[in-house]
Amino acid sequence: MATTESPKVSVVVPVFNAARYLPAAIGSVLAQSLREIEVVCVDDGSSDDSVAVLADLARSDERIRIIQLNTNYGASTARNAGIDAATGESVFLMDSDDFVPPHALERLLAAARTTGCDVAIGKLLWIKRAEDAPPANEPWPLGKVTTEAIRESLYLQSIPGSHCCNLYRRDLLDRHQIRYDTGLSYGEDQLFQAAAMVAAGNVAMIDEVVYVYHHYRGQSLTTKPPTLGNLLDDIEFHRRIAHLFTGHGLHAAGSRFLSRWTYSIREYWLQIPDALTLGEALSFFASFRLLVEEFGILPWNATTPAHHRHVLSLVLDHRDEDAYQYLATVEARLGPAPAGVGA
C-alpha cells in the first residue's frame, strides 16, 4: 500500500549483492505502522540481482526510491548518498539484510517529538545464529521513553549499540554536516553516531527493540578476518571519537572510551596471528602505542579480563613478538584454565 503524503521518516538502505535478503528486509520497512515513510535504497554497484529485486518491489509500492551508483564505493558512500537524497523529517539507517519490528519507526518518531530531541535511540536485538531469529510476527513490548543528556550519561558517552537503532532528525545531520567518513573501513558507524549524539546534546531513549541485526549473515566486517588497514582504522576511529569528546569538554568520556578494548581484542586482535604477518602486526602494535601515549591512559578498565590485559601490557612494554605469539594461544582466547584443570 502506497501513500502520497510527505514522508516523516526516510529509511536509508545501502545495498550490495543482497538480492536474497531484500524482500524480507524491505518488506519489514513497508509493513511499518508508520505509513508516511520513504525507503531510499542505494545500490552500491551490485553484481547480483539486487537492482532487479528492488525494481520489482518498487513497482508495488511507490514509497521505494532507488539510487544506483556506478561502482562499489562502500557502505559509507552509499549511506551518504541516501542521506543527501532523503526528504523525510528524520532519517533511519538500515542494512539490507536485517529486520525492523512493525512499530519501531512510529515509536522512535513519537519519542523524538514528545521529548523534543533530535536523536531517538532504541534497543538492538543481536542474532548470532539463524535458528535464534524470532518470528517476524512476534509482538514487541512497548517500553517507557526517557531523555538523557550526553554530558551526564555514561551510557550514551560509551557509544553503545548501533547507528541502526537511532532515528536522526535530518536537519541535525545537515546543520552539523554529519556524514559517514568514507576514508574509514571500520568504526565509521560509531564515529557518525558519536558526532550526532554530541551535536544533539539530549537523546530520547526508548526501552524497546527497534532493530534486529543478523550478525551471522556475513555482511558485517566483524565476520571477516581483519586486514592491517582495518586494524589501523580501528585505532583511528577510537582516536577521532576521543578527540570529539574532549573537544566538547567531555574529557572523562574520551578517556573512558579509549579504555574499552575488550571487544576489539575478542573480535579482531585474536585473529591477528592468522590474518597478519609478523611485520604487519608489529606495525599495528606500534600505532596502538602511539594512541595510548597521545592520551596518556591505560587501554583497559575494571571489566577487562586478565588475559586480555596481559596482551595489552605486552604491547605497551614493546614485547610485540611475545604479544603476537600469545594471541595464538588458547589462553589468549579463553583465559587461563582453572587451577587443577589439565594438570
Image (cartoon, rainbow, N blue to C red):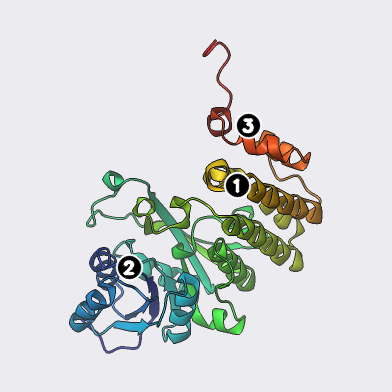
Q: Are marks 1 and 2 in contact (CB under 8 Å)?
A: no
> Do we see residue 256 in this rendering?
no
Callout 1 amino acid? Thr
**Dot placed on the residue nearer the N-terminal end, 3 or 2:** 2
Nearest to viewer (mark 3 / mark 2): 2
Nearest to viewer (mark 1 / mark 3): 1
Q: Position of residue 40 (x, y in %)?
A: 36, 80
**What is the number of callouts on the image?**
3
Between marks 3 and 2, how big is the CA–CA gap? 39 Å
Which residue corresponds to the image point at 32% horizontal and 81% vertical from the top-left? 36
Q: Quadrant of the N terminus?
A: bottom left
Callout 1 secondary element: loop
> Do we see residue 208 in this rendering?
yes
Q: Residues within 10 Å of mark 3 (few under 14, many from 20)?
A: some
**Dot placed on the residue nearer the N-terminal end, 1 or 2:** 2
Quadrant in the picture for residue 141? bottom left
Q: Residue at label 1? A: 277
Residue 17: mark: 2
Callout 3 secondary element: helix
Residue 307: mark: 3
Which residue corresponds to the image point at 40% horizontal and 56% vertical from the top-left? 208
Residue 21, placed above or below residue 113: above
Q: Are marks 1 and 3 in contact (CB under 8 Å)?
A: no
Q: Position of residue 213 (x, y in %)?
A: 38, 56
Residue 331, placed above or below residue 217: above
Q: Position of residue 320 (x, y in %)?
A: 71, 40
Callout 2 secondary element: loop
**Image-based side of 190 in relation to 30, left or right:** right
**Dot placed on the residue nearer the N-terminal end, 1 or 3:** 1
